[in-house]
Amino acid sequence: MPHNINQYDFLLLKALMYLPKVFAAIIGAIFGLVLSGDIGRDGKISINMSVIIKFTIAVTISLYGGEASIEYYGWQSYSVMTHGFIMLGWAIFGMLVIGVVYQSIALMQGKPLAEIIKEIKDAFFAIFNR
């Protein structure tokens, strides 16, 4: 007895294949928020419009940049987890660019370099509970 796959089952399968990519994009965006200084020294994120916008930008960079690079370099034949890793990298490095711009503006406004380094270091230690 052959299995008949209707269009809803097909859409569900496509969605399930895309879930690891979205998960990697979200994790990358969270790690990227560390680089922009939005995660406090205690490891908590204070949700405001700036954080929501940065998070949305990171996920967007990850999804569009990751898919574009997968298609451009012909990596469609690789596994879904490999695609997720590519998107994770896009999210982190996309937020890295945003974090560098943010910290550069803070430096131009007179914030000392030692304070910026301490802020980033404390945020990393808070996330990884050290």
Image: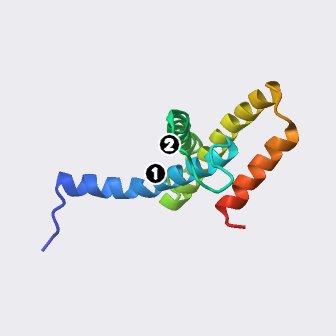
Q: Quadrant of the N terminus?
A: bottom left
User: What residue occupies the far top of the structure in this picture?
Assistant: 109
Spot occupied by residue 101 in the image (x, y as percentages of width and height)? 72, 31
Q: Is residue 85 above or below residue 91?
A: below
Helix, strand or loop at disc 1?
A: helix
What crowding class fits label 2: few (fewer than 14 Cα within 10 Å), some (14-19), or many (20 or more)? many
| Front-lying residue, 60 or 69 | 60
Mark number, residue 63: 2
Spot occupied by residue 107 in the image (x, y as percentages of width and height)? 81, 30
Mark number, residue 12: none
Q: Quadrant of the C terminus?
A: bottom right
Spot occupied by residue 80 in the image (x, y as percentages of width and height)? 48, 58
| Residue at the disc numbered 1 | 22
Q: Residue at x 41, y 56 (%)?
A: 19
Q: Is residue 118 left or right of residue 54?
A: right
Q: Is residue 53 above or below residue 42?
A: above
Query: In whole angstroms, how far apart are the C-alphas of marks 2 and 1?
Result: 7 Å
